[in-house]
Image (cartoon, coloured by chain):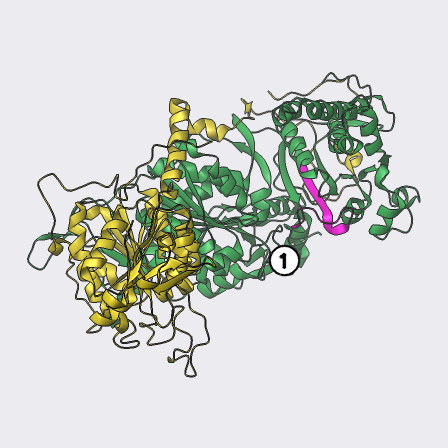
Chain colours: A green, B yellow
Amino acid sequence: MADMSTTPLTQLDRVVIRFAGDSGDGMQLTGDRFTSDTASLGNDLSTLPNFPAEIRAPQGTLPGVSSFQVHFADHDIATPGDAPDVLVAMNPAALKANLGDLPRGATLIVNSDEFGKRNLAKVGYTSNPLEDGSLVEAGYQLHALPLTSMTVEALAPFESLTRKEKERAKNMLALGLLSWLYSRDTAGTEAFLRAKFGAAPQILEANLTALRAGHAYGETTEGFAVRYQVAPAPMPPGTYRTITGNQALALGLVAAAERAGLHLVLGSYPITPASDILHQLSALKRHGVTTLQAEDEIAAIGMALGASFGGALGVTTTSGPGLALKSETIGLAVSTELPLVIVDIQRGGPSTGLPTKTEQSDLLQAMYGRNGESPVPVVAAKSPTDCFDAAIEAARIATAFRTPVILLSDGYLGNGSEPWSVPTVADLPDLRVSFASEANDLDGEGRPVFHPFKRDPDTLARPWAVPGTPGLEHRIGGIEKADVTGHISYDPANHDRMVRLRQAKVDRVAATIPPLEVDDPSGEARVLVLGWGSTYGPIAAATRLVRATGGHVARAHLRHLNPFPADLGEVLRRYDRVVLPEMNLGQLAMLLRARYLVDVQSHTAVRGLPFTAAELAQVIHEHLLALAPEEVSV
Amino acid sequence: MTIQLGLPTRGTDGVPTVPDGTSLTKKDFTSDQEVRWCPGCGDYAVLAAVQGFLPELGLRRENIVFVSGIGCSSRFPYYLDTYGMHSIHGRAPAIATGLATAREDLSVWVVTGDGDALSIGGNHLIHAMRRNVNLTILLFNNKIYGLTKGQYSPTSNVGAVTKSTPAGSVDHPFNPVSLALGAEATFVARTMDSDRAHLTEVLRAAAAHRGTALVEIYQNCPIFNDGAFELLKDRDQAEARIAHLRAGEPVRVGSGDAAQVVVRDTTGRLAVVPVGEVTDEQQVIVHDPSDPDPSQAFALSRLDDATMQHMPMGIFREVTRATYDDAVRAQVDEAVERAGEGVSLDALLRGKDTWTVDGTRPGEVEQTLEGEVTEGPTAAAGDALVQEADEVRPE
């Protein structure tokens, strides 16, 4: 789009914008498009979609507010931003629900058309905040614009469209205006609209017109004193795309299967916020991916396990309530010692909890949520793009050790997006596996025989002998098996041995994982901030803040929750204090205290939202202060 | 539009067979494990019949898999020298679905009981049948929980006095055949543990059927429900009660003077009447298991009640419908074929919207830190520089 603007341009290093509206207003799409156009500009970015569980909550109400926050910068950033610099509010509910998060001085772009008496009353406004001066008094830069009527007016030539249809394009008008304000090119969005509405030329033209009208309004209005520019961020050379955690995880599974030379079979049952992985993989049949939408969570993992028995990479994807239902089958996979990847995109619990909000409260369920001594390796992704690598790592452990592996992500990672330096398949880890093909032992009379539970001396993995292999016919199951032969055994000593062998096998995974990486640039830190999963971004940003004020703090992040890296105990003991933020009530802290007898300091919150960097920086400051009051300036 | 998928038609199509001129024997299918059912258990007879029948299929032993759930009958796989999985309670149909879909070259069998299949695993059973996965399901029905020592099951009669129903069961039982027909199973049959010839005949048809074949096998539990099917085992009683379902033949019960026939009465219901009372031959029900409409098969299944006065045995339904596993594989195969050489995982990872960074560039603006409290974007950072409109492009 040609730029005719003469408004002065201000250079910014980073901006946080939150688009908020009714759940039918298309705010997620608007945010997605702004993100895409921002990515192609070369900014680093991070996003946080936040939407209600209801598909269309009652219009104009607080529970119906859907928002999308995007943080973009000319440098490396780690979070979607603590607080918006700009709030785009499409109705009174969106204003009211989000205003509390806005710092003084923030810019408000509000659709004044929606601020009629009825809509104001719906959310308890007794006077119109756009007119009563309260917002300006509070220090906000208010731009009250009639976005709906501007859209309808711009679309006046479209006689075949109803008023309602025209109004629906108001999100594109808002996007056009924001694109002008932040110097984004809308070519990507125009191409996107062409692909989406190619079959409906009227709708396509209407959307394009609204988008351009928003941009043109910015160029001609004198309402905005400055517009802004955020330069590209320096990033390592490579090919980049933006990707959400769930997309990355799905691609990671496909890549893992390819690198393992295995057929990927997903058994899944729809559940928020994991369903996107099922959708993604269902569309990848041309890559040989089989997806089975099962009748329930139990059948979903059963199908995956059946496929694994048949020599495929069996995977099931779910969220917390589904993981609870899968427990017994995970136990069967522990007993049969078959590879299986169980993906849990965690959400707020217990029970149905907060389906669209994030939490890290399934860790103990993943670790221990089964009957009997039932050890399962657990790995966690730390960022949206890391979901790709975490999926490959889960598949590596599952196939190499013939074990179910639980991969933990969460709603924040699953739906959040960031730029991804796209890897080359040939550079990914080699996960090739070999199936058993011949006898592996001798029977009592010295004749060759196949023993399904004769283990690899290094990994303790048992052979993966798939049906169709002549001479290796055998039976597996959930009843305790005799060591080596795999026959049913109720022998007390054998059971004790098998329980310990299964634990030892999982413990041996630790020998194949790298030492814990500790970020301690000054080498003078006495406080270590440890994290796992999606707290990675907030912790990284918080430690930067603390270091900027002269504080010394070290940071480490766990990919492997079971087994832990071999040097974890040593790392923990190296510091005077270990601080562990978690979006649960201290689940990892409890594990670490029990395992290493280290007095881990837990910081917890379960609000359904990620930590803010400022909050964690404050927590770290308090710990620094407690250790050395004289050295710390807060 | 009907998509011609060119799918296989026999249950064992695609499963490798033994080399020409060779054959396996019952012994080849007998594992070295000691069979541990109670003396007199009906399971022994079924095991012997299955071991005796499997060589007839001519399949390679290593391409046969038995998957079971939990219960007495679910120990079955241990006694067969094939591949097998003794899984968890009720879930065998789900596990078998995954296996059968992933592996076209396997003959997959499910062994289950009335508690396993119809109570805890009811959901998986009905969904396997509606999907029509290529499986043969042997449902051992002894109308009791045996392994947990004698509680009533979902097929126990109302009034059944068991350990958990000392005052008699108040649960209305399932009729497994009616249930299977309701779930639109494409093959539904009923047979008896002690009738080796009939059992084998039904197994033969079930194995040949492509899709889910549900075979209900009445099976005696000598410990907790002995004699449950005695009325059908006693030669004279059986003669008077069992209606052997044979394709193309009238449905009859008994013989000689006591011969009865199943007719559709004036209300449209099925009734069993003495042959001599039939006034209109048109009313006599001629069995047609291939009828796409399952309603007559369902009506026949309702002739059975707790008194076992009339007991249809044999194949109720045998129709052709695309199987789930074939259709799933066909979709994948077709997509792979259409993509041809053009499919590239690297291209998939890149997606449609990429940009390239070929060097690092210094940031031009002093950085603010995430979480730092600032007062809006104008105060955020940097010098306000007035520029001519100058679009920033990625390198």
Q: Is residue A459 visible?
A: no
- Callout 1 environment at 10 Å: few (<14), some (14 to 19), or many (20+)? some
- Image location of residue B220, percent across then percent down: 26, 70
A403 sits to left or right of A593: left
| Residue A46 against residue A51 in the figure, above or below | above
Q: Residue at coordinates 50% horizontally, 55% vertically from top-left?
A: A322
Identify the chain of the residue marked 1, using the numbered disc in the image.
A
Magenta-drawn stretch contains A65? yes
* Depth check, front residue: B8 or A335: B8
Q: Residue at coordinates 22% horizontally, 60% vertically from top-left?
A: B78
Q: Residue at coordinates 24% horizontally, 53% vertically from top-left?
A: B203
| Residue A604 against residue B207 in the figure, above or below | below
Rendered-image quadrant of the C terminus of chain B: top right
- Image location of residue A625, percent across then percent down: 66, 57
B282 sits to left or right of A414: left
* Depth check, front residue: B20 or A574: B20
Tag count in the figure?
1
Magenta-drawn stretch contains A422? no
* Depth check, front residue: A104 or A381: A381
* Residue stretch in magenta: A51-71
B196 sits to left or right of A232: left
The three-letter amino acid code for the residue at tag 1 is Val
> Residue reaching furthest bottom?
B167
Q: Is residue A547 visible?
A: yes
On the image, which quarter does residue B371 sit in? Answer: top right
A143 sits to left or right of B34: right
On the image, which quarter does residue A104 sit in? Answer: top right
> Residue reaching furthest right?
A132
The residue indicated by pointer 1 is: A606
* SS under mark 1: loop
- Image location of residue A597, percent across then percent down: 47, 65
- Image location of residue A138, percent across then percent down: 87, 46
